[in-house]
Image (cartoon, rainbow, N blue to C red):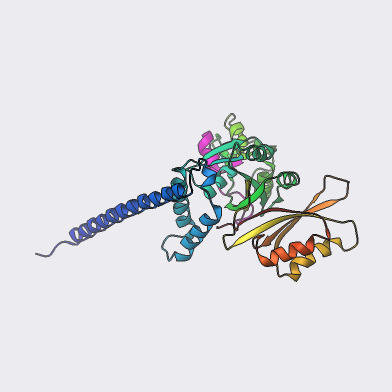
Amino acid sequence: MPKKKSETLQVTLSDLRQRIDSVDKQIQDLIAERAGYARQVGVAKGPLKQAIDYYRPEREAQVLRAVADRNAGPLSNEELLRVFREIMSACLAQQNPLKIAYLGPEGTFSQAAVQKHFGHSVIAIPMASIEEVFGEVENGNADFGVVPVENSTEGAVHHTFDMFLTTPLKICGEIELRVHQNLLSRAADMSQIERVYSHAQSLAQCRSWLRRNLPKAEKIAVSSNAEAARRARNAEDAAAIAGLAAAQVYGLKVLAPNIEDRPDNTTRFMVLGRELFPPSGHDKTSLLLAIKDQPGALYQLLTPLAKHGVSMTRIESRPARGAKWEYVFFIDVEGHVESGPLQAALADLGPVAAQLKVLGAYPAAIV
């Protein structure tokens, strides 16, 4: 007697679930094997005691790019990279978890950037200001720091750039984080909202949406989006613009999701460390250059880069801390500072620049 269609489907589902269980076991066994190899790497490096002694960002970047290159679906690169980051994070934490300082409090986009780059198996240390993040890494209380440097909608975070004028720290990584802004509140609906708290950058990223939807509400800039959420939870006529993590931490509901004016709204973060790392094969270098006060000075700074085929990806000017009307330039270029073309360009830049400082050389962000 032939089986009914429902019975055939049930058998198929049961078989598929058994196969999934078998694959899960293989995955678990392989993760355990990988963790064992990672521990052996730590032993092979000798009697090192700190997590930073084991961490190699160039190696992680190579592994993650290989994951993306091998990916044939059905999962997206973003999903697979997130899985492998967490595996590497957990394997490294066997030795000793990394300590990462970031612009807090808990629930900020900076914390999300830490988790994207380092995974969840780290000790994340929230700091009250960008200056304190730099100080925590300089003093050795944190292995690395994460600070915002620019947003695709609103441009540079000037305080971060100004800190690079005096810090001995090096940039050893970059993170690109897709930023979704949300209107969070205890209120039942937007008609009750009289005040909107957020960081000045986030208010600017949602300027048009606020003008259309909450034209009469007072807009109040605060130190962070998490601080905005903390304030909003204390009043039913207030709202915050922040990420979903802040909604969870501070017990707020989402009145309106994804209110950023541009759908590609992205913030770039820099990873701060105390040393430069070797090339990964797909790198950037950040430079600080000051020009001499003479005609065509900026042209003379840029000419060596073009002469040696070094591609510039970004330039930002900031007032110098010497005399007024003097400026320094922050320049990002493709390639690692150890590469031949960039070494040649820097040699030509030396005589024409009033100041030349390599801020860092690091793997380009893996989106």
Q: Residue at x 70, y 47 (%)?
A: 157
The quarter holding residue 215 reads top right
The residue lying toward the viewer, choosing from 84 and 272, is: 272
Where is residue 227 drawn, in percent x and y? 62, 35
**Would residue 165 appear left or right of 326 to someone viewing this image?**
left
Quadrant of the drawing holding the N terminus: bottom left
Where is residue 278 drawn, in percent x and y? 59, 57
Does any portion of residue 268 appear in the rendered image?
no
In this picture, which residue range is highlighted in magenta? 241-265
Q: Residue 81, relative to residue 54: is it above or below?
A: below
Q: Residue 198, relative to residue 75: is it above or below?
A: above
**Would residue 295 appear left or right of 156 to someone viewing this image?**
right
- Extreme-right residue of the structure: 294
Q: Residue at x 48, y 56 (%)?
A: 81
**Would residue 15 appear left or right of 57 to someone viewing this image?**
left
The quarter holding residue 281 reads bottom right
Q: How many labels were placed on the picture?
A: 0
Where is residue 195 drawn, in percent x and y? 66, 35
- Extreme-top residue of the structure: 234
Q: Residue 171, relative to residue 239: is it above or below?
A: below
**Would residue 107 appear left or right of 334 to someone viewing this image?**
left
Does any portion of residue 170 appear in the rendered image?
yes
- Extreme-front residue of the structure: 46
The residue lying toward the viewer, choosing from 79 and 285, is: 285
Quadrant of the drawing holding the C terminus: bottom right
Residue 290: in magenta span:
no
Q: Residue 8, relative to residue 233: is it above or below?
A: below
Where is residue 334 drawn, in percent x and y? 66, 63
